[in-house]
Amino acid sequence: MKKIDKKVALDLVSKWSKDFDKTVKKFKSDKKIVMRAVKSYGYALKFADKKLKKDKNIVMNAINNNGYAYMYMDKSFNKDKKILLKAIQNADTNWQLYKFADKSLKKDKEIILECCKEEFSDVLHWIEFAPEDIKKDRNFLLKLVKANGSTLQYVDKKFQTDLDLIYEGIKSSPIIFKHINNKLKSNREFVLKAVKINGDCLQYLSNKFKNDIDIVKIAIKSSPLSIVYASKEIRSKDISEIDKDYLNRAFPNTF
C-alpha cells in the first residue's frame, strides 16, 4: 500500500474500498481515523490498537454499526450489560456473542430474554445453559416463551406440561409441538385449542388429527395455508374457508 496522509486515510475509511482493511491497520492508533472506520463498518474494531479497543466511545460506535464488533473489544467490557444488550440488538444472530459474554451476564434474565427473541436454534444456548433457578421461574418463563416459544424445550420439565406456557409458546412457535408429551398431543380438546391459537400446529399433529375435518377447519381459519398439512382426503374436500384457486397456484399438484 502506497504512503498516504491522514486526510486521504479518513476518506478511505468512510466507505468500503479494497484498501479499507489496510488503511485501518496502518492508522490503528489514530483515534479519529479508527472512529470514522468503526462508524462505517463496525468490524473495523478488529484492526484497532489495543488502547483504542479500551475506548468505550469507539466500542459503542462500532457495536452500533455491527453487533459482532463485541467480539473484538477489550475484555474489560465483558461485564458491561449495556454494551452486550446493544450488541445483541445489532447482530443478525447472537449465539456467537455467547462465548464472549461474562458468566454473570449469561445468568441475567434481561439478557437471556433479549437473546432468545431470535428464532435461530443456536441462540437458545442462552436458555439451554442458563442456571436452573431461572428455568424454574414461572413468571420469567411466561415472558420467555412469549418471546420465543421454542425455548420451552429447555425449561424445567415440570413446566413442559404447563398449559399457559404451552399456549403462549404456540403463538410464536408451533414447532414446540415436537416437544410436548404424547399424552397432551393425543388429547383432542387440547389440539382443538392449539390449532385455534395457531393453525400451523397442524403440521405437527398425528395423522388421525390431520384427517379430522373439525380440527382442520379450525386450523385453516387461524392460518389458511395450514391446509397443506391436512390429510390428502381432507384436501380433496370442498372446505368453504379455503380459496383453492389461490392454493393451487401457490402449491401446484397439492390439491
Image: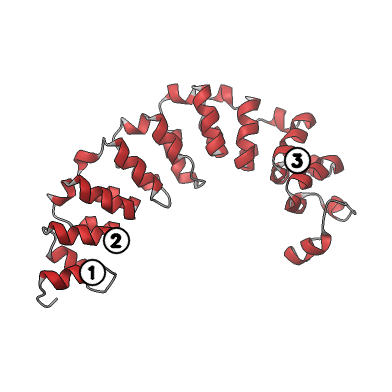
**Element marked by disc 1:** helix
Q: Which residue is drawn at 69% across and 31% down?
A: 182
Identify the amino acid type marked 3.
Ser
Identify the amino acid type marked 1.
Phe
Q: Around disc 3, counting alpha carbons within 10 Å, would you say few (fewer than 14), some (14 to 19), or many (20 or more)?
A: few
Which residue in the structure is indicated by mark 2? 41
Q: Residue 160, percent across and down?
A: 59, 27
Contact flag, marks 2 and 1 (Cβ < 8 Å): yes
**Element marked by disc 3:** loop
Q: Which residue is drawn at 21% across and 41% down?
A: 75
Q: Is 174 drawn above or below residue 33 in the view shown?
A: above
Q: Which residue is drawn at 79% across and 32% down?
A: 188
Q: Which of marks 2 and 3 is nearer the N terminus?
A: 2
Q: Residue 85, percent across and down?
A: 36, 41
> CA gap, disc 1 to disc 3?
56 Å
Exactly how many numbered labels are in the figure?
Answer: 3
Which residue in the structure is indicated by mark 1? 20
Identify the amino acid type marked 2.
Tyr
